[in-house]
Image: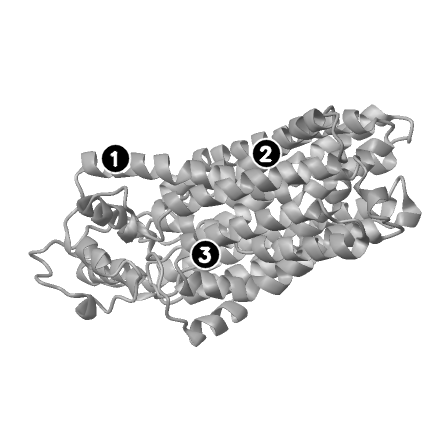
Amino acid sequence: MGAPNEISPFTAPEVVPSDDKQAIPVDAKIDPVTRTETPDLTKSEFRINDEAGEVAVKALESGPAEAQIAKRVLKKIDLYILPILCITYGLQFLDKTSLGYSSVFGIIPDNNLKGQDYSWASSIFYFGYLFAEYPGVALLQRLPISKFLGINIIAWASILLLTAACSSFAGLATVRFLLGVFEATISPGFVAITGLWWTRQEQASRGPLWISFMGLFGTIGGILTFGIGHIDASISTWKLIYIILGGFTILWGIVFLLVIPDNPATAKWLTPEERVVAVQRVIENKTGTKTRKFDKAQIIEAFTDPKVILLALISFVNAVASGGLSFGSIIIRNFGFTALETSLMNMPLSFLQAVCTLLGGWAQTKLPNARLIVGSVAMLPPIVGTVLINQLDVTNKWGRLVGVWLLASYPTGFMVLLGLLSTNIAGTTKRSTSNAMVFVMYCVGQIVGPQCFKANQAPQYHGGIVAMLVGFVLNFAFNQVLRYLYLIENKKRDAALVGKSEAEIEALKEESRIQGFEDATDKQNAFFRYAL
């Protein structure tokens, strides 16, 4: 049967496709419980495990919030939370890719890097990321999320400052490893924050926005390094890059700690009434806010769920291709550009990444059930781009540069992946475990990617470009397999409702609504539907 728009962090509301005429819409309206329907309910009677506690109980007891109040609360959330997420995510991308910018300003000879040393300096960041991912995600669940992330931001900024003091491969590798440790929880943390504050419909525009700041700050990074390259200072240009980025990020970490609350119930910039409304707004996500209780059964469910396993594989192949871009500046310079020209030539790539991410988010709000389709289509330009880089004559530097710029749409696939983590997995422990699985595979891919660029293949790096091509092709294929699994599961759940009375269906709806705050998983919630 036909289906309107899909709900997801990056899509509009939908009815999940099904051959059954009683198919239940993903965004089916579940009327909030009123005080007359559930008088004097308490946290224990609701079996609420959610961190929002009594605020969650009040949200479940109360009738629908007035539209004017809900709109005011959304405006506050967008004002206080969204800009901080955007700038922080841009900074973490700029900070971790600073090695690429500094590679053309003397960091390689000043640290006596030989052979594969630069590749390992790039990869070692993700060894730190890998080392910290599982314990980091566990701590995200157990500790106040904003305080934990804020401290990590200040820590990685301090490590960035220390990089300017490096003079050997050993020192550079050490700070890169530690940088990976402290940046490891940012992406899974931001996925969690997005689910805490915005409805599925609203995530359709907010998610792509903060992710797009990777590309925007990549553009800013090109402008910044181009400007720093003209500074006549007593220290090397690459050291100035790290000092400026590290100093600013420390200040920004303090801002993050002061502004971002741990959950809607602790937001100082919301009134008590607005805190209840903030929780009411996300009830129908069926994912609650967060519980600090660790559930072993949910860990097993995550590791045995084929849909989660496929998400991890998508993360791996996307990261292999992404890891190769740590050589982006070197590849462009080898086309025949100077160091300053290379900084400028990097800017269109970063700008196009931001544009493609926003366009991908927009497409998913306009097209029904399009999320994984958009993720697959985003792999087509990079496939063409890698072919151009590898097959055009080495003298055709502009044609090969266009090939590099065509790689810009691949982050859209990463955007899709983060959206699926936010909306298609319920249960706090299952979600945190799934996040860890996905980002561990992301780390492995980022480690593998640079190692495909062999020093003995410079300056063409044919093997590395082929590895990126294979990653893009597999990403396309895995997206479609995952979409098929989601579709089949949705149809099974629709079929299970056949023959039930209207009263039974309404009772299931009510149970589903409360289950989100009782830490039920997507597998356990009969009315949970997977966004496609």
Q: Residue at x 64, y 45 (%)?
A: 161
| Real-space CA distance between mark 2 and mark 3, rounded to the nearest whole angstrom | 24 Å
Q: Nearer the viewer, mark 3 or mark 1?
A: 3
**Alpha carbon distance from label 2 to label 1:** 30 Å
Task: Measure the C-alpha gap from mark 3 to mark 1.
Answer: 29 Å
Point out the tag, 2 or 1, that comes first from the N-terminus.
Answer: 1
| Mark 3 or mark 1, earlier in chain | 1
Residue 75, horizontal then vertical, whole percent: 30, 34
Q: Residue furthest bottom?
A: 296
Q: Is residue 422 left or right of residue 307?
A: left
Q: Residues within 10 Å of mark 1 (few under 14, many from 20)?
A: few
Q: Position of residue 525 (x, y in %)?
A: 34, 63
Give the amino acid at mark 3.
Answer: Phe
Residue under label 1, please give it.
71
Label disc, if present, on residue 217 of the rendered structure: 2
Look at the numbered disc 2 and give the secondary structure of its residue.
helix
Closest to the camera, between mark 2 and mark 1, is 2
Residue linked to disc 3: 148
Which of the two residues, 245 or 419, is positioned nearer the viewer here?
Answer: 245
The reply to whether dot 2 and dot 3 touch (C-beta < 8 Å) is: no
Q: In terms of secondary structure, where does tag 3 sit? A: helix
Q: Amino acid at mark 2?
A: Phe
Residue kind at label 1, given as amino acid type: Lys
- Examine the image and state in which quarter residue 42 appears: bottom left
Residue at the image point whose x is 50% and y is 40% from the top = 251
Label 1 sits on a secondary structure element that is helix
Q: Is residue 361 above or below residue 306?
A: above
Instruction: Give neighbour class at mark 2: few <14, some 14-19, many 20+ (Cα, 10 Å).
Output: many
Rendered residue at 57%/44% (across/down): 92
